[in-house]
Image (cartoon, rainbow, N blue to C red):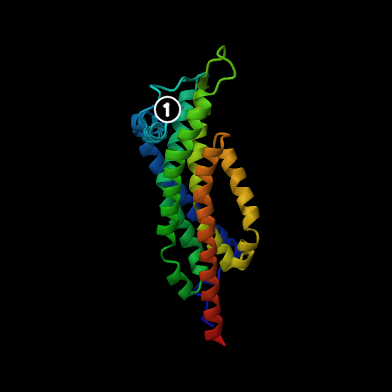
Amino acid sequence: MAKKPKNEMSFLDHLEDLRWHLIRATIGILIAGTLAFIFREFIFDTIIFGPKRMDFPTYKLLCRAATFIGLETSFCGDELPFIIQNRTMAGQFSAHIWTSVTAGLVVAFPYVIYEFWKFISPGMYENERKNARGFIIISSLLFFIGVLFGYYVVSPLSINFLGTYQVSAEVLNEIDLSSYIGLVRASVLASGLIFELPIVIYFLTKVGLVTPEFLKKYRKYALVIVLVISAIITPPDIASQIIVAIPVLILYQVSIYISKIVIKQQEKKEKKNV
């Protein structure tokens, strides 16, 4: 068998190494967050408050689809019937700070993954490092696809449903700034992390915690979990939950194939070493 590369490090040495990787990753997030802080108008007026306007691309698409099949819908209105307001002295400044940090995390995600990879790669075999060279690109691509899905699908569906929902005409929807931003942030980050499922399954298979048979056996339970997650991050209507659940189920199926590939590679290595 091939020997593991370099440096027999003590536990404290590993902790020190991890600390510096975390520091560099944090610096990357802060730099990207600082840029987001500077471009405040673009971040808030264009991105954050984009799903509040009825000219948002998702609403236009859904309005055309509903009109084509002859359905009445709230996606074709002139504006959403709610306002966003701030109720605390430091509310807008705090929203500016934390939104910038979140934007920094999203933008710097590839660098954060790079630092994570630099920490774990020395403990891998040479051929394992070669086979996983696309890890940073693939994981970043999946994350950004998830972020876009959360922003263009989950966020507008949630905002449109919750922003137009009324128990009585006597009750006006005056949404707090932190509540609105929290919904957008949760939708985007949750979707980005959910789309990392194939990467998670890859590593769980590598360490022997997951097999293709295990994933197939518990597929029906995974379906229930996916529907529960969809219900949590989307408004409580079946159409929205199905829209969110479909790509997650596709990712689950892709994860099964990835697990199969990993198992086959491990079996080939074992045959070569016999």
Q: Amino acid at mark 1?
A: Lys
For residue 120, above or below residue 6: above
- 74 left or right of 167 in image: left
For residue 229, above or below residue 64: below
**Looking at the image, which residue is at 55% across and 63% down?**
256
Quadrant, the C terminus: bottom right
Depth check, front residue: 245 or 260: 245
Depth check, front residue: 26 or 211: 211
Q: Is residue 94 visible?
A: yes
Q: Position of residue 16 (x, y in %)?
A: 54, 58
Q: Residue furthest bottom?
A: 274
Q: Position of residue 185 (x, y in %)?
A: 49, 37
Residue under numbered circle 1: 52
Q: Residue furthest top?
A: 170
Q: Is residue 199 visible?
A: no
- Label 1: state its secondary structure: helix
How many numbered tags mark residues here? 1
**Looking at the image, which residue is at 60% across and 45% down?**
227
